[in-house]
């Protein structure tokens, strides 16, 4: 479990708090999406979870961030990494080897995993990611989506209970982005790994995450299930967040008095909404 207690952080020389008193509990097995405009503090929050803040980025840190009982200020980043693995947007900058196998072995060897466990962990990680056939491939020959799967496989080989992704699909095309999120959902459902995804692609989060946390100007302004959060389109738009088009359609119909139900966030939900409206009003109303 992750517990944030009135977490505040200001980078050294910063003019305002990057995190402005955030309190949040993330239970084991959650799939949480974190959204917000540029400068909202999303990446800083991810850094606070994995200990990069304040251990590598100095500044004024107040409150507490607990990761499975570990205080991130007292625990070193290596100790935190045993519980929480991180994947970042700059995937090439995160890679340390030239071959898929070596990339996964690097973490296992540096975390001093017993030698007789390494091969089993390597095979299990490749299998979970569905990339067994890439074991001996050069990383330079892989697509963006394949590289992200390698990065996540390297993390899962260490068997963390939590994975944090900071804009991990930012440079990927829609197909590759979806493949990564399908893999994350599988890890979450099959193995109970907690997934925390900082992401701009709100439609992906609406489809795969169970809950959303909305940040703006360093503060947590809204937190709830996907459905609960999308019932506040005015607040989201006020934060500069583009809501899904199907949600915009539901809002427009609601504003015109045609619809009073929950705003949709998927094509299936929008289809059901329109079917009910046509059944009730007929084509003439539109």
Image (cartoon, helix red, strand yellow):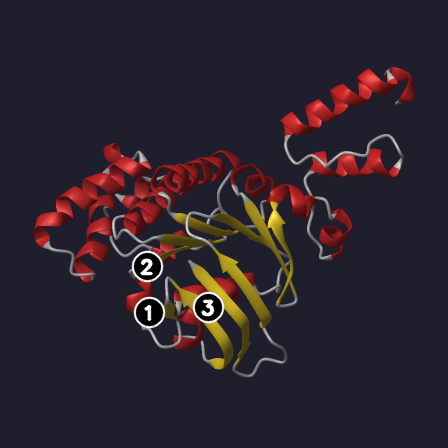
Which residue is denoted by mark 2 in the rendering? 83
> Around disc 3, counting alpha carbons within 10 Å, would you say few (fewer than 14), some (14 to 19), or many (20 or more)?
many
- Residue 77's label in the rendered image is 1
Residue 254: x and y in percent read 83, 36
Secondary structure of the residue carrying tag 1 is helix
Of the image marks 1 and 2, the number of the one nearer the N terminus:
1
Towards the viewer: 69 or 222: 69
Q: Is residue 137 visible?
A: no
Residue 81: x and y in percent read 32, 62
Q: Residue at (54%, 43%) from the top-left corner?
A: 210
Asked if the residue under mark 1 is in contact with the one under mark 3, i.e. CB atoms within 8 Å, the reply is no
Using the image, determine if residue 60 lies above or below residue 65.
Answer: below
Of the image marks 3 and 1, the number of the one nearer the N terminus:
3
Which residue is denoted by mark 3 in the rendering? 48
Question: Where's the C terminus, which quadrant?
Answer: top right
Using the image, determine if residue 226 lies above or below residue 111.
Answer: above
Q: Quadrant of residue 15?
A: bottom right
Question: Which of the two discs, 1 and 2, sits closer to the camera?
Answer: 2
Secondary structure of the residue carrying tag 2 is loop
> Around disc 2, counting alpha carbons within 10 Å, would you say few (fewer than 14), some (14 to 19), or many (20 or more)?
some
Q: Quadrant of residue 279?
A: top right
Residue 85: x and y in percent read 35, 56
Q: Residue at (71%, 57%) from the top-left corner?
A: 239
Residue 181: x and y in percent read 46, 40
Q: Quadrant of residue 220?
A: bottom right
CA distance separating discs 1 and 2: 10 Å
């Amino acid at each position: 479990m992750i517990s944030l207690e009135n977490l505040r952080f200001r980078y050294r020389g910063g003019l305002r708090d990057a995190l402005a008193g955030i309190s949040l509990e993330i239970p084991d097995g959650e799939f949480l999406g974190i959204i917000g405009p540029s400068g909202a503090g999303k990446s800083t929050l991810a850094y606070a979870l994995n200990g990069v803040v304040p251990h590598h980025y100095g500044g004024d840190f107040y409150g507490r961030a607990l990761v499975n009982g570990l205080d991130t200020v007292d625990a070193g980043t290596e100790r935190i990494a045993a519980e929480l693995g991180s994947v970042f947007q700059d995937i090439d900058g995160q890679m340390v080897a030239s071959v898929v196998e070596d990339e996964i072995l690097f973490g296992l060897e540096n975390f001093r995993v017993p030698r007789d466990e390494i091969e089993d962990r390597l095979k299990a990680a490749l299998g979970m990611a569905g990339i067994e056939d890439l074991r001996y491939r050069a990383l330079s020959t892989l697509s963006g989506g394949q590289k992200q799967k390698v990065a996540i496989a390297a993390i899962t080989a260490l068997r963390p209970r939590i994975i944090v992704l900071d804009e991990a699909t930012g440079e990927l095309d829609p197909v590759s982005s979806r493949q990564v999120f399908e893999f994350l959902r599988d890890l979450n459902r099959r193995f109970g790994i907690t997934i925390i995804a900082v992401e701009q692609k709100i439609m992906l989060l609406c489809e795969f995450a169970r809950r959303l946390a909305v940040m703006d100007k360093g503060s947590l302004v809204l937190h709830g299930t996907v459905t609960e959060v999308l019932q506040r389109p005015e607040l989201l738009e006020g934060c500069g967040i583009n809501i899904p088009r199907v949600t915009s359609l539901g809002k427009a119909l609601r504003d015109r008095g045609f619809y009073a139900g929950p705003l949709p966030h998927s094509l299936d939900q929008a289809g059901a909404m329109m079917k009910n409206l046509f059944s009730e009003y007929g084509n003439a109303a539109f």
